[in-house]
Image (tube, rainbow, N blue to C red):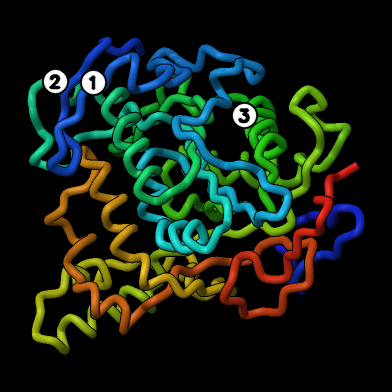
Amino acid sequence: MLVRGDWTAPRGGREASGASRCCTDTELSGVSVTISDEHAGTPAPHTLEGPRHPMSTPELLRSDRVGGSRDGGALRMMTVHAHPDDESSKGAATCARYVDEGREVVVVTCTGGERGSILNPAMDKPGVLDDMPVIRRAEMARAAEILGVEHRWLGYVDSGLPEGDPPPALPEGCFALGDLDEQTGRLVAVIRDLRPHVLVTYDERGGYPHPDHIRCHEISVAAFDAAGDPDRYPEAGQPWQPLKLYYSHGFSRARVEAFHAALLERGLESPYGEWLANWSTDFPDPGLRVTTRVQCADWFPVRDAALKAHATQIDPESRWFLVPGDLQREVWPTEDYELVRSAVESPLPEDDLFGGIEVPARERRAS
């Protein structure tokens, strides 16, 4: 059985091996959208000056999209991400597959992505950068609709990616500088409300060392440990213990090498040569930690559509889309994960994040 870090299995289980304009016009993946107070829902509960709502604020836990019936017989998964668009680039096909199979999937986004740059030249238009918080909220809503997931904002402010030598200080009031205990409590409240059986997040390096990704990892692991403990965050709702914790691993060297070789074999240009030549050996390849590969190639087109919904962040001409679909299915038809903690028996390697989990007629709650 697999265990990462110091953790005691839950009882009965075993350890496991700013303000926006009232109306904005923009274009998302070729679709003209008008964002208004009537249709966009409550503005994100944060500003560039810092979060302004405590954990108990009702708006914090309001979903932008109706869903998540919490049916007692349904298996449920929660994925926790740093920014809007991360949910579409990390495990999106897995989410879409599980939704189609009748599982309930919730995406939690820690920040609003307010400090994101315009990475798609087609979206580099007057007014877009000024309205980035509103536009990214609309992009996230569209991506959630495409994936079929329920979505929750956690309500923190994007820290930005500091660049320079030395890098500048992070901005005051940002997610990465926030109080870890308060942030953990906020996520615990969402876990107890939505009652996921599986929680998915990033590894200790954040997937890549963005300060928001690292903080997302920290609060996700802390919330997984705390959610089932009735003595911790008693104001956050009735205890609920998720059964399995995973890290997503999308960019292993083996995966990149496989795509690079397959493209060259077909006589196609590969965008991965320079990446492989400069591959850092400072840390072990995350691919060596993979325990679970979820077959989801049939849902790659859904993943790509969700990515393109984040039109300010994703250039449809970028390397994200240079590998032909049939080649992806042939070379690497899975999304890959690391089982970190489990309260159920699930022999490794796995092919299902819900492996070993059975939902009884009356759902188990931590007591």
Q: Tell me which residue sits at (66%, 43%) in the image.
A: 70
Q: Quadrant of the C terminus?
A: top right
Disc 2, SS = loop
Disc 3, SS = helix
Q: Is residue 166 visible?
A: no
Q: Tell me which residue sits at (71%, 79%) in the image.
A: 347
Foreground residue among 307 and 37: 37
Above or below, 87 against 100 in this view is: above
Real-space CA distance between mark 1 and mark 2, rounded to the nearest whole angstrom: 6 Å
Please, what is the three-letter code of the amino acid marked with disc 3? Answer: Gln
Please, what is the three-letter code of the amino acid marked with disc 2? Answer: Gly
Marks 1 and 2 in Cβ contact (< 8 Å): yes
User: Which residue in the structure is indicated by mark 3?
Assistant: 183
- The quarter of the displayed image where residue 243 is located: bottom right
Q: Is residue 331 visible?
A: yes
Q: Quadrant of the N terminus?
A: bottom right
Marks 2 and 3 in Cβ contact (< 8 Å): no
Image coordinates for residue 268, horizontal then vertical, percent: 10, 79
User: Which residue in the structure is indicated by mark 2?
Assistant: 127
- The quarter of the displayed image where residue 255 is located: bottom left
Question: Which badge, 1 or 3, comes first in the chain's sequence?
Answer: 1
Foreground residue among 79 and 184: 79
The residue at the far bottom in this view is: 265
